[in-house]
Image: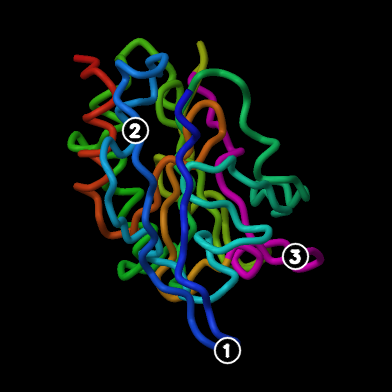
Amino acid sequence: MTSPSTATATPRAPGATLSSSITLATVAPAGNRRASPFDAAKPQARTSATILIGFSATVTSFASAGNSPLLWMRFHSAPVIRLADAKPVHLGHVARADGAWRLYIFADQNDPADPDSLARNLCEFLASSASPVTRFTPVSAEPDSVIDVRAIFQQNHRDLAIDTMPSVLLPRKGKFSLIDYEKVFCADPDADDIFGLRGVNRETGCMLVVRPDQYVSHILPLHDHQALVNFFARILIDAN
């Protein structure tokens, strides 16, 4: 039996920044082990992958040890505030076991209403015809049934208005097309700040793709829309 993939990083001297590149161990061909439906989402050969795009290159990054999850590791929860009702919740606990992929948008520092906001530009792309959400979700299905998009903003929840959020974060669902207001979150000022806790670069933000089994599958910068499309195109089937 082949051992699971592991990630190694260059030892870090005190005060030095963490390397932005890690080496992913070789994944055995499917013929040597039981095939997995997630094989398409894993590297098939030894490769060096830069996964800190959009993250601060510090020891408290997603690619570091400790409380921050590595790529291919289980998504670690953290406290946040749900914008719609100011309710403190744990981000990792809001996802249901419904078979959907999760796309977590860790927003850049710009106001989400600002045209320069990378998070807003990404959300507008996700609502377009070129979006993987549109491409892989059947017309008759709920808009979040295949790719569930959620966003976490740096601003205090008192400084943002839920009705100004992009449409992809306010999907209409069910028989009566009611708006789902539970897709938008803010950092919790009374708990460990999720951006600091996970080492997210506050200036650029990032997006995190999490598999249905809650394992981190990809990390991308907010502006790399095509890379997101390419990633899902290797895994999902066109709906239309």
Q: Nearer the viewer, mark 2 or mark 3?
A: 2
Location of residue 64 with respect to 208 vertically, above or below: below
113 lies left or right of 68: left
Q: Are marks 2 and 1 in contact (CB under 8 Å)?
A: no
Lateral position of residue 221 relative to residue 64, left or right:
left
Residue at (44%, 19%) from the top-left corner? 142
Horizontal side of residue 130 vs 39, given as left or right: left
* Residue type indicated by callout 3: Asp
For the magenta stretch, what is the residue range? 177-198
Labelled pair 2, 3 in contact (Cβ < 8 Å): no
Q: Is residue 173 above or below residue 26?
A: above
Give the residue at mark 3: 192
Task: Report the Cα–Cα distance between label 2 and label 1.
Answer: 34 Å
Residue shown at the point (26%, 40%) measured from the top left: 45
Q: Are marks 1 and 3 in contact (CB under 8 Å)?
A: no
Disc sitting over residue 15 in the figure: 1
Q: Quadrant of residue 224?
A: bottom left
| Residue at mark 2 to residue at mark 3: CA–CA distance | 31 Å
Q: Residue at x 40, y 40 (%)?
A: 168
Element at label 1: loop
Amino acid type at image mark 1: Gly
Residue 147 in percent (x, y) is at: 41, 30
Q: Quadrant of residue 30?
A: top left
Q: Position of residue 172 (x, y in %)?
A: 47, 27
> Would you name the residue on which mark 2 appears?
41
